[in-house]
Amino acid sequence: MSSLVVDIDSKVYGNGTCAISGLHITAKQGEFVAIVGPSGTGKTTLLNIIAGIDKQFIGNMKFGESNTNKNISFMFQDSRLLPWLSVQKNIEIVLDRHDRNSVEKQSRIAELLQKVGLEGIAKSYPNQLSGGMKRRVSMVRAFVNQPQLLLMDEPFQSLDAPTAFELRTMLLELWQETKCTVILVTHSLREALTMADRVVFLSNCPANVILDYDIELPRPRQLEDNTVTLLHTNLLMQYPQILSGSLFSDSLLDKETEQSE
Amino acid sequence: MLFYLKWARSISLLGFFLFWQIFAVLIGSDLLPSPVQVIASMWEHFESGELMMHLGITLRRVAISFVIAMIIGVALGMLMGSRNIWDKFLDSIVILALNIPALVTIILCYIWLGLNDTAAILAVAINKIPMVVIAIREGARAIDTRFMDLGKVYHLSRKELFFKIYLPQLYPYLFGAARNGLALIWKIVLVVELLGRSDGVGFQLGTFFQFFDITSILAYTFAFALVIFAIEALIMRPMEVRLNRWRT
C-alpha cells in the first residue's frame, strides 16, 4: 500500500513568517484528495514539500514503503514546459534516461498525446501552442511516467470554461486508468467537489487542517450537476467562513460573499 | 524587398569598398592604397606562404586564449551568479581585473614569465576573463528557478539538470560573451605579438610599420577580416539559429 502521510510540525519561510503549523494530511492509494484554502495560506508550499522540492521543514513526509519514491508527478499552475525543448522532448525528460527511446515508452507518449487530442504536434515548440494545449502537454508529461502520486497546483486556472471542462474530463479518465493518488490544490470549492473523493480545508496562515470532508456523491459528476450545487450550498450554509479559513462564522452577512464564489 | 534584406550585408560592404576605391584614386597618395592594391598585396603575401604562416600562428593563440578565457570566465560567472557568498568574495577582484589596462598585464606577464607563448596567451586570457565573468554572472542571476524545481520533482540527474535546464537559459549570454570575446582577444593578441613575439600577425604589422608599408598592413587586416567573416558565417550564425529555433 503506497499511502501518503504528511506530518508538518512547522514550516517557516526565510523571512520568519510561519507558513504551516501542525498540519496532518493522509491519502490512501488511488484516492483523489482536493485541498481548498484561502489564498496565501501555503498550499503551494505544502505541495512543494510533498514533491520534495522544499526540504526546509520540521516534520515527516512518507509515501509508500520507501522515503525516496521516484514516481511523483507535478502539474504546476503554469504549464511549465521548457521553451527550448520540443513537445516530445519536454515529455521525454521526465522518463528514465535509459528507456526514453524504448518502443514501449515512445508508443505510450504517442498514445497519451492522441488521448488528449494533440497528435502531430510532438515536434512543435511550446511557444507555438495555445495555453490550453500547453496544459494538455503538461498533463501528458505528468502521466507518462505512470505516477503513483500526482500533485496538482491549480492546474485549470486561467483557462476558458470549455477548455477547463475538457481538461478535467481527461484528467479523471487518466486518473481512473492509472489509479494514482492525486492531491489537487484549488481555490474553487465547486471544482474540488466535482473532482475529488475528499476535500481538505485549510485554515489561514499558518496552515493546518480545519475540516476533512468526504464526498459521497456518485461519479461521474459535472461542475453544473444539481447534486454538486446542492452539496456546495449546504457546505457553505453549514460553514459560512470555510473558504476564508475558519470553521465558524463571525457574522452571517459574510455568507453572501462566500456564495458568490 | 526580401531580396534587399538578404543581400543587405553584402551591399553595405560593397558600397564601402567602392567609396574607398574612388577616394583612394582621387587623392592618389601612398598613404592610402586602394582596395585593389590591397587585395593584390594580400595575394602576394599569400603566395609567398608567409601570410598563412603568421595568420595561422595568430589564430592559434586567439583560439587557445579564447578557450581558456571562456572556460574560466564561464565557471566563475556561474559560481558568482548562483552563490551569493562567492559573488561578494570575488566581486572586487573582478572589478579590479576588469580595469587593469591590457598593456600592464602584458608587460607584467612578459617580465615575470619571459618572452614566450605561455606568457602571451596568459596575458590575453587574463584580460578577457573578467568580461566573460560579468556577462555570465548576469545570465546566472536570471536563471528561472521554477524550471529547476521541475527538474527536482522528476529527479533529473545533475548532468541533465545542467545541460537540459540550466545551460539553455545561459545560451544568449554565452553567445554575447563569445562574440565580444573573439573581437577583443584578436585585438589584444596583436598587441602581445607586437610587444614580445617574433612571429604572428602582430609581429608582421610591427615590421611593416617600420617600413611604412601601409598596403601590407591593410592586406593583413583584410585577410583577418575574411577569417572573422568565415567564423561568423560558418560557426556562429548557424549555431545561433539552431539554438534559437524555439523562439518563434
Image (cartoon, coloured by chain):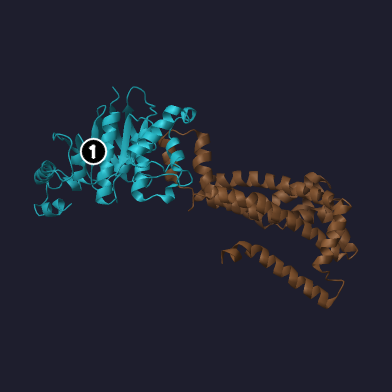
Chain colours: A cyan, B brown
Residue furthest out toward the bottom: B26
Q: Residue at x 64, y 54 (%)?
A: B179
Quadrant position of residue B220: bottom right
Q: Is residue A261 left or right of residue A119?
A: left
Residue B218: give x, y in percent of width and height. Answer: 81, 63
Q: Residue at x 27, y 46 (%)?
A: A164
Q: Is residue A100 left or right of residue B176?
A: left
Q: Residue at x 82, y 50 (%)?
A: B52
Mark 1, Cα crowd under 10 Å, few <14 / some 14-19 / many 20+, is many
Q: Is residue A222 left or right of residue A20?
A: left
Residue B247: give x, y in percent of width and height. Answer: 49, 52
Residue A217: give x, y in percent of width and height. Answer: 13, 35
Q: Is residue A29 left or right of residue A127?
A: left
Can see residue B181?
Answer: no
Residue matched to label 1? A34
Give the letter of the chain under mark 1. Answer: A
Can see residue B1?
Answer: yes
User: Taking A13 as reference, is B155 above or below it?
Assistant: above
Amino acid, disc 1: Ala
Quadrant position of residue B184: bottom right
If the image is split into quadrants, where does the N terminus of chain B sit? bottom right
Residue A246: give x, y in percent of width and height. Answer: 17, 45
User: Taking A156 as reference, is A200 above or below it?
Assistant: above
Quadrant position of residue A10: top left
Task: Classify mark 1: helix, strand or loop.
Answer: strand
How many tags in the picture? 1
Relative to the observer, which residue lies in front, A103 or A92?
A103
Relative to the observer, which residue lies in front, A112 or B92?
A112
